Image (cartoon, helix red, strand yellow):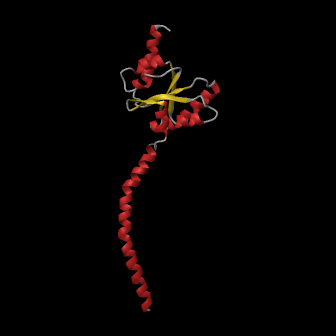
Amino acid sequence: MSKFVKELLTKEISNRLDGVSDLLVVDVAGLDANKTVEVRRTFRDRNINMLVVKKTLARRACEGTSLGPAFTDIEGSAAVVWGGEDIVDLAKEIVKLHEDKKMPKFTAKGGVMDGEALTADKVVEVSKWPNRAEQLSLLVGQILGPGRTLAAQIKGPGAKLASQVKKLGEGDE
């Protein structure tokens, strides 16, 4: 490949990854064309992008950015995956595809989250975290919990008093 073509590809990769803060690097070697199309269709439905790259060009394109650590220890073929709601959803999708019996060769090699390199094991660990929607529901529950408890404590004695007054009122008639 000529130097000019390498520069063009490097710029294209850099432009596509512009604004991306988190991504995963996956191994797609061994997937036939039909399985690759199936993976891309699944990703498209979930607003996830996948780009098969030459790792040296991707390393060069991401050099000096927060995505650079993702390509330091990558061996063999690679595809870059980014998008979705957050990095946790992305990791869950990658791990789910790997655990699918139809695509055992689709594995995570690593990635980058907030400028920090991720190993394949760390990607599996991240996939077990709660995603953004789950985190928001946990937070709302923690915020509303004390108020709900206070309301129940205030309402409890009043309800007891009201039932006793009702009982006394029924007894007089």
**In terms of image quadrants, where is residue 21?**
top left
Task: Judge left or right: residue 97 versus residue 74.
Answer: right
- The answer to whether 20 is drawn above or below residue 135 in the figure is above
State the count of labels.
0
Residue 79: percent from the left, percent from the top? 52, 24
- The answer to whether 101 is drawn above or below residue 145 in the figure is above
Residue 106: percent from the left, percent from the top? 57, 29
Residue 82: percent from the left, percent from the top? 47, 31
Question: As rendered, which of 119 and 136 lies closer to the eye?
Answer: 119
**In terms of image quadrants, where is residue 40?**
top right
- The answer to whether 152 is drawn above or below residue 120 in the figure is below
In the orientation shown, which residue stands out farthest toward the top?
2
In the orientation shown, which residue stands out farthest toward the bottom?
173
- The answer to whether 161 is drawn above or below residue 134 in the figure is below
In the orientation shown, which residue stands out farthest toward the front?
121
Task: Judge left or right: residue 82 versus residue 64.
Answer: right
- At 38% across and 32% down in the image, what residue appears? 114
- At 59% across and 36% down in the image, what residue appears? 99
Q: Quadrant of the C terminus?
A: bottom left
Residue 32: percent from the left, percent from the top? 63, 24
Question: As rendered, which of 73 and 48 lies closer to the eye?
Answer: 73
**In terms of image quadrants, where is residue 45?**
top right
